[in-house]
Image: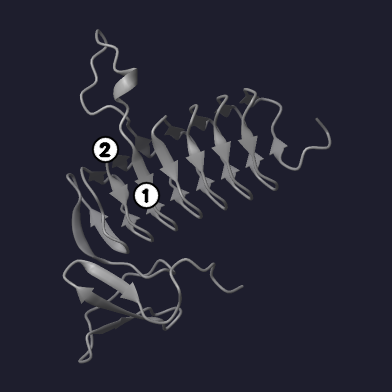
Amino acid sequence: MTDRSYFVHDSACVDEPCEIGAGTKIWHYCHIMSGARIGKDCVLGQNVFVANRVVIGNGVKIQNNVSVYTGVELEDYVFCGPSCVFTNVINPRSEIVRKDEYMRTLVGRGVTIGANATIVCGSTIGRYAFIGAGAVTRGDVPDYGLMLGVPAVLKGWMSRHGHRLGAPNADGVMICPESQWRYRLVEPGVLRCLDYPEHEPLPQ
């Protein structure tokens, strides 16, 4: 269709019916299954697979060679690095059909998932968390958490602008070097931005 509001490369396969928002770009050799929902202004790089019933928010960027399986939901502005991996069954066996046992994985707004990272199913990745390249997460991740290693462990905190936050000052505040926004641990393991609503889009 020449009048559609999104772009699909000629080599991509889009199974109808599905939902694709205005301004989204779907590049070479992607496969979008029927029943998938993709928001506005997303970019799906080469060889991305999106299964049925997957929900992808607005402004999501999925780099090359990523498969997003049924049970996964990506909220707005998630970044999925090249070849990162999602799963949806905790104990797969080829001999046993477990299509009724898919586990939900929720990736919160603004999360970054590094190249070759693995997100084990059944977890929630909190808003603006940062999963380092090659890390393997096995459970829930707090908002703004920096997760590194195999298995991934919490190694610090990241700002909404994607900078590692340093040690808190005398007032218990950590400051983003780019935005100068302030962050504070309001309780153990719970970081909050003091200067901008977490659900509002960044000012342009």
Residue at image coords 26%, 59%? 142
Q: Which residue of the protein is positioned furthest toward the front in this rendering? A: 100
The span from disc 2 to disc 1 (Cα, nearest Å) is: 14 Å
x and y percentages locating residue 140 in the rendered image: 24, 50
Question: Would residue 27 be visible to someone looking at this image?
Answer: no
Above or below, 24 against 166 in this view is above
Specify whether 188 is left or right of 119: left
Above or below, 199 against 69 in this view is below
Above or below, 158 against 132 in this view is below
Q: Residues within 10 Å of mark 1 (few under 14, many from 20)?
A: many
In this figure, which colouring scheme has been used for the structure?
one colour
- Residue named by callout 1: 114
Q: Which residue of the protein is positioned furthest toward the top in this rendering? A: 95
Image quarter of residue 67? top left
- Residue named by callout 2: 120
Q: Quadrant of the C terminus?
A: bottom right
- Asked if the residues shown at circle 2 and circle 1 are in contact, with their CB atoms under 8 angstroms apart, the answer is no
Q: Amino acid at mark 2?
A: Val
**Dot placed on the residue nearer the N-terminal end, 2 or 1:** 1
x and y percentages locating residue 175 in the rendered image: 34, 82
Residue at image coords 20%, 49%? 152
x and y percentages locating residue 126 in the rendered image: 33, 56
Image quarter of residue 193? bottom left
Question: Would residue 99 be visible to someone looking at this image?
Answer: yes
Residue at image coords 32%, 32%? 87
Q: Amino acid at mark 1?
A: Gly
Q: Which residue of the protein is positioned furthest toward the right in this rendering? A: 3
Between marks 2 and 1 in the image, the one whose residue lies nearer the viewer: 2
